[in-house]
Image (cartoon, rainbow, N blue to C red):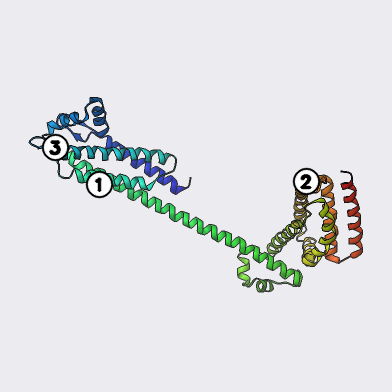
Amino acid sequence: MNKTEKRMKIFTLIMQVIIQAVLLFPWMNMGTWKCNVPGYLIKLAASGDGMSYIKKSLKPLGVLDGADEQMMVQILMLFICELVMVLVIQVIGIVNLILALSNHHKLLLDIMSLIAGCMISFLGADGAVFSDPLSQVYPFLLVVLLVINLIGAKLIDSWQEEKKIQEEVKAREKNYKEEKKKEIMEKCFECYCDNGLRNTGIKELGKYCGMTSANLYSYFNNVDELIIQSTAYCMTKVEDDFMELSPKNPQDIMRFISEIPKWSAQKHGKKYRLMYQVYTHPKYVEYGKNFFKGVSMRYTEYAKQLSPKLGIPVDILTGFIFIFVRATVHYAMFEDEYYLKAEMEALKLSVISVLSKK
């Protein structure tokens, strides 16, 4: 629960308790006794004859004296309407209390309560039923409380909505910055691939990214951080590219072994050379160790995913993946055809041997 929701809960609880207390106050002056609406309705239900009980209870007030049949019906209907409206406010208040406890406040219920309160105030304005000062003032007091409740709830609701909008804006800004940072890392990595690690300065990186050096530093604390993060991000993407083309069944394995090394060299050769240039640099060697620990874990997970499709045990397939990747990266960096052919032929024979034992 955030602060605004907490404020709404506390405000609603306080206001509804106050409103319920006012509603339970014995404001109905029946001449010889005073009561509240729930108390009156309980006695009305217990009487067994509702209309007769109402007429009898209103008799001490003298409001029915001298009234013809039509006037009497109007007064009775007016009285019943007041009771119903007060009961509606009371029920809505109880519902609001329950909703507030579960953090599901409904502004519509506050509006309905205020409408009911205004109707009570309007119906009782001419003193047709209650003419004593307290009973006359009571509906207006109730309306004032309901107005305060509605305005307060609306203000807090507006604050909550504004905060929600601000959070959405911040989330969009954060997402934009994250996506922009990824774009910058790709372009900076490309710049280093094209120009080399040593020969690339911050201005050249800015040109590739289409921004100033100052803007670059708003995404990275320094050039070392840019190099480390760009290398890790871009080489992880290379892995994803690599694994998207992985064989889907045992018959597809030989195709994968034959085609992927040269495809990888053509598409990612510069990236592999830069990666080794970065991770063998004394400044970045520890980052390299951590990166390759992650590589080992990811390739093991790839093996677990591929094992059911290819019908090769996970432990054996993991070894095949490492051999294949090492040979592929070596070829991508140095284009050593002899080394690649020797490794791939040995790998093919090993795969055939494992599959033939099934």
Indicate which label's residue lies in the foreground, 2 or 1: 2
The amino acid type, in three-letter code, at marker 3 is Met
Report the disc number at residue 72.
3
N-terminal label among 3 and 1: 3
Instruction: Residue 294 in the image: state x and y as whole percent.
Output: 75, 52
- Crowding near pointer 3: few (<14 within 10 Å), some, many (20+)? some
What distance separates the C-alpha of mark 3 from that of mark 1?
23 Å
Q: Is residue 221 visible to us here?
A: no
Tell me the crowding category of disc 1: few under 14, some 14 to 19, or many 20 or more residues within 10 angstroms, Cα based: many
Mark pair 2, 3: CA separation: 87 Å
Residue kind at label 1, given as amino acid type: Cys
Q: Is mark 1 on a helix, strand or loop?
A: helix
Q: In which quarter of the image is the C terminus?
A: top right
Q: Is residue 253 above or below residue 188?
A: above
Q: Residue at horizontal 33%, vertical 50%? A: 151
Q: Earlier in the sequence, mark 2 or mark 1?
A: 1
Q: Position of residue 71 (x, y in %)?
A: 12, 40
Residue at the image point whose x is 26% and y is 38% from the top:
84
Three-letter amino acid code at the position of disc 2: Pro
Determine which quarter of the picture holds residue 99: top left
Q: Give the residue at the far left of this rendering.
A: 66
Residue marked by disc 1: 118
Q: Is 193 in front, or is 329?
A: 329
